[in-house]
Image: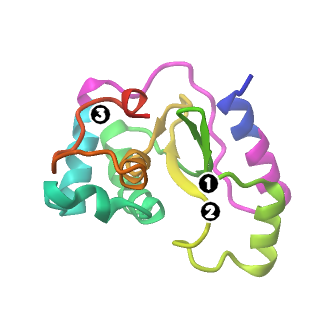
Amino acid sequence: MFSFDAEYVDAAKFGAENKLDVPFLMPDENRILNDENRKQISELFIHYSGIPAKSWERRITGQCVAAHFLLMDKIANILGSQPALTLGWVEAGGREFYRFGQQEVSRWLKEGIGSLTDAKLHMWLTLASMEIIDLTFVPSYIVVNKIPTNGNRPSNPPSEIL
């Protein structure tokens, strides 16, 4: 059975062994996200994206690194807790997206990653509670899978879209 907590710990150990500055998250079983701060994060994302509703998903696709890096400290201010930028892959709807492993990371460390837009990786924010804030996966999924939105941001949670 997949355990994000265990995967995160393994990735952090791998990062430390390769002299990467990986933030150590003290696991906290208390949930950090709630309806109010999720709403604030959503409003922050909409404000900083500057994207009109009718074209938002196309403009966000492929921008996971920029979006999460740009908003990380602002989200930390909302939550009162510093999230960790996290590179990884996603499993959703019975499919794997952006799958890579330690072998690819080792190669990237030696040779460079090249263009971030061409790299098969995904970035999100991870909280000490092991909750994930991912502002870009669902919009990218919508574009790639040609899911109609009629110009509106979906109000359904990701679990209902994927």
Residue 78 covered by magenta stretch: no
Choose the circle earlier in sequence order: 1 or 2.
1
Residue 34 covered by magenta stretch: yes
Q: Quadrant of residue 115?
A: bottom right
Vertical arrangement, residue 123 with respect to residue 112, above or below: above
Vertical arrangement, residue 28 with respect to residue 114, above or below: above
Q: CA distance from mark 2 to mark 3?
A: 28 Å
Q: CA distance from mark 1 to mark 2?
A: 5 Å
- Residue type marked 2: Lys
Going 44% across and 48% down the picture, which residue do you hit?
Answer: 137
Q: On the picture, is 94 further left or further right than 103?
A: left
Colour scheme? rainbow
Question: How would you rate the neighbour count of disc 3 (Cα within 10 Å): few for under 14, some for 14-19, many for 20 or more?
Answer: some
In this view, the mark in front (2 or 3): 2
The secondary structure type at the circle numbered 2 is loop
Residue 154 coordinates in the image, percent (x, y): 24, 39
The secondary structure type at the circle numbered 3 is helix
Q: Is residue 19 visible?
A: no
Going 14% across and 60% down the picture, which residue do you hit?
Answer: 52
Going 50% across and 31% down the picture, which residue do you hit?
Answer: 131
Q: Quadrant of residue 108?
A: bottom right
Residue 150 coordinates in the image, percent (x, y): 16, 47
Residue on which disc 3 sits: 38
Going 76% across and 55% down the picture, which residue do you hit?
Answer: 15
Question: How would you rate the neighbour count of disc 2 (Cα within 10 Å): few for under 14, some for 14-19, many for 20 or more?
Answer: some
- Residue type marked 3: Arg
Residues under numbered marks 1 and 2 in contact, where contact means CB atoms less than 8 Å apart: yes
Residue on which disc 2 sits: 120
**Magenta stretch in the rendered image:** 10-36
Q: Main secondary structure of the magenta part?
A: loop
Residue 124 coordinates in the image, percent (x, y): 50, 49
